[in-house]
Image: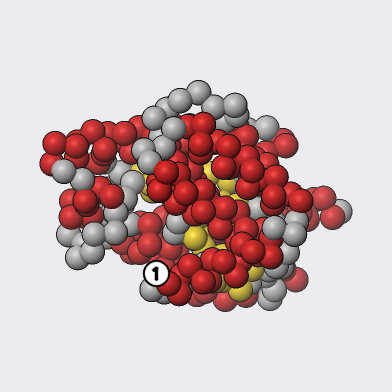
Amino acid sequence: MITHTVRDLTAGLPTSAEPCALQTDIRFVEFFGLPGIGKTTASTLLANGLRRCGPLVGDVRIAWETRNFIGRQIYRIGIVAPRFKDREFRSLFARIARFVIESGQSSIVDAAKVIWNLSFLVAYVQSERPEKNTITIMDQGLLQGFLSILLKSRHRATSEKWLDILFAIGVHDIAFVHLRGEVGVARDRLQKRGDRSSRMQRASPDRDFDLWSTADRACREIAADLEGGMGTEDHAGVLAAVVVERFASPEDVAERVLDAVLLACLERHRLCDSVGQ
């Protein structure tokens, strides 16, 4: 467990660095984990915690505000459509579509949904990347998009791995936070929610156990693959695992996430300083 405080983190900074934002190349913090584990709550609390750090981390934003279905799709079209002028985005879009189709989704509708969702996330990251001294928090990011693909696939052989596509998108400026908890914890929390936005809530009782087991296994495999892949210099990123215990409050979880993110920012700040010198 990380126990560093903001005072610990700033103690080693030179006086001239304290009044302004840390010079760090981390632009995004994205959560992934089981449905119901607390990603949305943690993202809101993390944003509030980072903002309390004042000028230390710069501007802090949550990726998108709540919209109804039609408003959300109009917003997404406005982000995705301009990106088709960019060759890199067109290439990534084609790779995502090919990967989804080859993986064998449950239906054509499922295939279209996951292609559209992940393509939007790529477009969003690319459009926000040029921002300076800004951290954008996503409760549903790229890893969650790939998780949706893997959950709905028939696990057919594909011409490339999901991790290769992720690395082509770029992970150097992203801090991935894996909210890791037992299936029972996530399922109990999800059932207490009033909506039915997750497919886990709509699953029949006889399929419930299989779906949760598949999701838990997929989350662990994604985290393990990402940790192994980011160990190379070409794909240096940040991966933090925060355990969500059954009786842990959302504030306790968010505090541990805040420590992990600040540590990552501080480490990148020091790296930027050493490169500059």
Q: Nearer the viewer, residue 226 or 96?
A: 96
Residue at horizontal 14 percent and vertical 36 percent from the top: 206
Q: Residue 11 location, x and y as percent?
A: 61, 62
Q: Nearer the viewer, residue 175 or 71?
A: 71
Mark 1 lies on residue: 69
Quadrant where the C terminus sits is bottom right
Residue 120, placed above or below residue 181: below
Residue 172, placed above or below residue 41: above
Q: Amino acid at mark 1?
A: Phe
Residue extending furthest front? Answer: 108
Q: Quick one: SS at disc 1?
A: helix
Residue 232: quarter of image: top right
Q: Residue 2 location, x and y as percent?
A: 45, 49
Q: Nearer the viewer, residue 229 or 191?
A: 191
Q: Residue 132 location, x and y as percent?
A: 71, 68
Locate residue 14 relative to residue 222 in the image: left or right: right
Counting the numbered discs, the total is: 1
Residue 158, placed above or below residue 2: above
Residue extending furthest left? Answer: 205
Q: How is the image coloured?
A: secondary structure
Locate residue 24 relative to residue 200 in the image: left or right: right
Residue at horizontal 44 percent and vertical 51 percent from the top: 113
Q: Residue 213 location, x and y as percent?
A: 27, 34
Residue 81 visible in the shown view: yes
Residue at horizontal 44 percent and vertical 32 percent from the top: 104
Locate residue 111 relative to residue 158 in the image: left or right: left
Residue at horizontal 61 percent and vertical 62 percent from the top: 80
